[in-house]
Image (cartoon, rainbow, N blue to C red):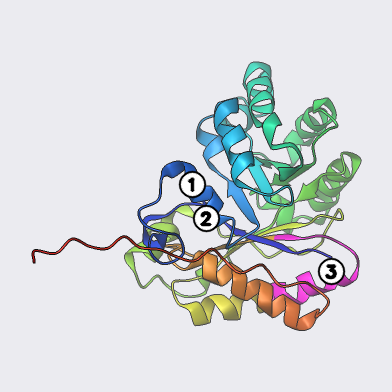
Amino acid sequence: MSLHVGCAMWSLKPWQGRFTAHPLPAGERLRAYASWCNAVEGNTTFYATPTRETVASWAEQTGPDFRFVLKLPRPVTHEQRLSGAGPELREFLDAVEPLGPRAHALWLQLPGSFGPGDLDVLAGFLRRLPAGHRYAVEVRHRAFFDDPHAVGALEAVLAGADAEWVPFDTVMFFQAPPTSDAERDAWTKKPRMPRRSLALTDRPIVRYLGRDSTEQTVEGWRFWVEAVAGWLREGRRPTVFIHTPDNADAPRLCRRFHDEVRAEVPELAPLPEPLPVERAEQPTLF
């Protein structure tokens, strides 16, 4: 039985000296993060494909049970919309190969304009992908949430490829107007997505966006604590990513979410203790 939890990144300035040692070389930050969380969203691969050497260093810093959910590059999903992006896709697949089993799923985050009329393109793309990976798809077109026919058609396409549908739950975030600069920035950038909780495979993936307020964030994830506990009882192996507008406390929130699920499912093993946080002594004048 396993539940993986993680953040949208593995390094953030507010974490230094709180969750990870400071100073810490860039090549050691993932190792430190991986003592707090056992999964991470690979958002950076959307903007640029890393070298194989860089990816090999990610593998070296993490155990074989650590999960990367890696986003396919923007040219593949957004610029060429899954058509004619063969070179970019091959470069990406070659680059991530050193992760081996740590590459838990390759994640297609599709633009909001990618709708029901594009499902044949998605189906053909998924059929052409190599069988050695698992795949997960995030959609943002409202028809996939409001139109039962479109929902059923997308589920059929994903089922045919044993691919998961990744929900991005922003319901709590948009319940009240923003109260901070970080929330105001997220308010203009994050999609207003309905909540969806039907798992299509044995390895569901959830993205959840809370608020700056820990209390509101925890209130909003109660739904997912129950859903994830149910999945675990069914023998599924979920991965949950916890976001907040500033992500300043995200590693601690991930562990709290894991603890709350474990309170519902006591046979779930606890996460290991994080590495001790060391902070360099500040120089003084005397």
Residue indicated by mark 2: 32
Image vertical order of residue 97 relative to residue 272, above or below: above
Residue at position x 65%, y 54% in the image = 39
Q: Position of residue 153 (x, y in %)?
A: 85, 45
Q: Are marks 1 and 3 in contact (CB under 8 Å)?
A: no
Nearer-N-terminus badge (1/3) = 1
Q: Left of 34 or right of it: where is 260?
A: right
Q: Under tag 1, what secondary structure? A: helix
- From the viewer's perspective, tell me whether residue 286 is left or right of residue 85: left
| Image quadrant where residue 34 sits | bottom right
Q: Which residues are magenta?
A: 223-239
Cβ atoms under marks 1 and 2 closer than 8 Å: yes
Q: Which residue is mark 1?
A: 28
Q: Residues within 10 Å of mark 3 (few under 14, many from 20)?
A: many
Residue type, label 2:
Ala
In which image quadrant can residue 158 be found?
A: top right
Task: Out of 94 and 192, give the one closest to the viewer.
Answer: 94
Secondary structure found at label 2: helix
Kind of residue at disc 1: Glu
Q: Can residue 110 be seen in this snapshot?
A: no
Give the amino acid type for the residue marked by disc 3 in the picture. Answer: Leu
Q: Is residue 25 left or right of residue 162?
A: left
Q: Residue at x 86, y 61 (%)?
A: 236
CA gap between label 1 and label 2 equals: 6 Å
Q: Is residue 67 above or below residue 213?
A: above
Q: How far apart, in angstroms, are the residues tagged by discs 1 and 3? A: 32 Å
Q: Residue at x 38, y 63 (%)?
A: 17
Instruction: Return the x and y of residue 69 as percentages of the image width and height.
Output: 67, 46
